[in-house]
Amino acid sequence: MMIIDAHAHLWKKQQGKVNGKDVFPVGDGKSNFGGEIRQMMPPYMNDDENTFERFIANMNYAGVSGAVITQEEIDGNQDNYLLSAKKAFPDRFKICSLYEEGKPFLTDGFDGIKLCAGRLPTQDLTKHYKVFETALKNNMFISIDLADGDAQTGSLLELIKQYPDLRIAIGHFGMVTRENWLEQIKLAREKNVFIESGGITWLYNSEFYPYPTAIKSIKEAADICGIEKLMWGSDYPRTMVEITYKMSFDFVLKSKELTDIEKLLFLSENAINFYGFDDVKEQEIIPNML
């Protein structure tokens, strides 16, 4: 089966912000996260670089054909680095520029625009309509992580109605473990709105692999908007501090609650069609020493 990752991160140097405080690496995959030390990446990433070369190696090993590289304000703007990643692997990466309120944003060379909506100073998304308008004019998609629950679903729905032909991917599976998460899922009833599961293993980390409740949530969301509107995402590399990259989708492959067709749509076909992965190829799996 071809597999597409709809939500991953890359950076050469992390220098972001969280609640106005700096985020920066301190070694062995750890970062100072606004004054707290957090394991931001697996400890083997001890050079503090989350590179595309390393990610491609992980993709090749796990059999992932393509990936969407989104962004996060806590990592800092990675536009220039993502352009170099796309240049090196044009068939395997779709990349997003980062929208930061009050700053210009890029379109040239990018496939989409990322909004960390829950972190925006102005939470009413209709005030950011220019981003949506620009994405549509440039045949780009919007990758958006909403605030918890239904805090921003009303204003996003207004923009969906205003720009019905704009492709919008809502991240973190609607913040699935938070109250009113299904209000985000309901938005995918609209024609060009999809849901991607980047971060679902983080949100269900206390349950851990094989995440049976996450599978139930995928089925619950499918009942609301259709399995054809749901896409897998890993949230690499932060989720890799607990699991391997392959484990971030293996629990879906091995589930007995999902049909083969549902797995194919969720792990592959929906993302290929939504993002336009026209030239990706199925990866050869190399047997390991086990």
Image (cartoon, rainbow, N blue to C red):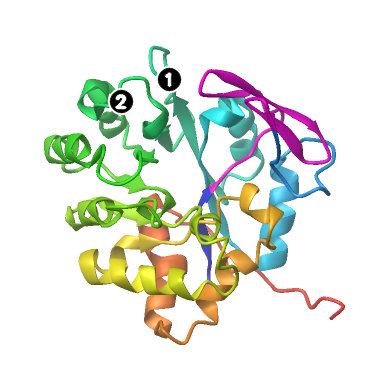
Question: Is 106 above or below relative to 193?
Answer: above
Q: Residue 57, labelled with which disc?
A: none
- Disc 1 and disc 2 in contact, CB within 8 angstroms: yes
**Residue 26 among those drawn in magenta:** yes
Compared to 81, does 189 lie above or below? below
User: Which residue range is magenta in the image?
Assistant: 8-36
- In-front residue for pair 194/180: 180
- Give the residue pinned by disc 1: 105
Residue 111: x %, y % from top left? 43, 38
The image shows residue 58 at horizontal and vertical percentages of 71, 58
Give the percent coordinates (x, y) of residue 215. Answer: 43, 73
Q: Quadrant of the C terminus?
A: bottom right
* Residue 28 visible in rendering: yes
Residue 69 belongs to magenta span: no
Residue at point 55%, 55% (across, down): 202
Residue occupying the point 66% across, 34% down: 11
Q: Residue at x 31, y 54 (%)?
A: 181
> 19 and 196: which one is in front?
19
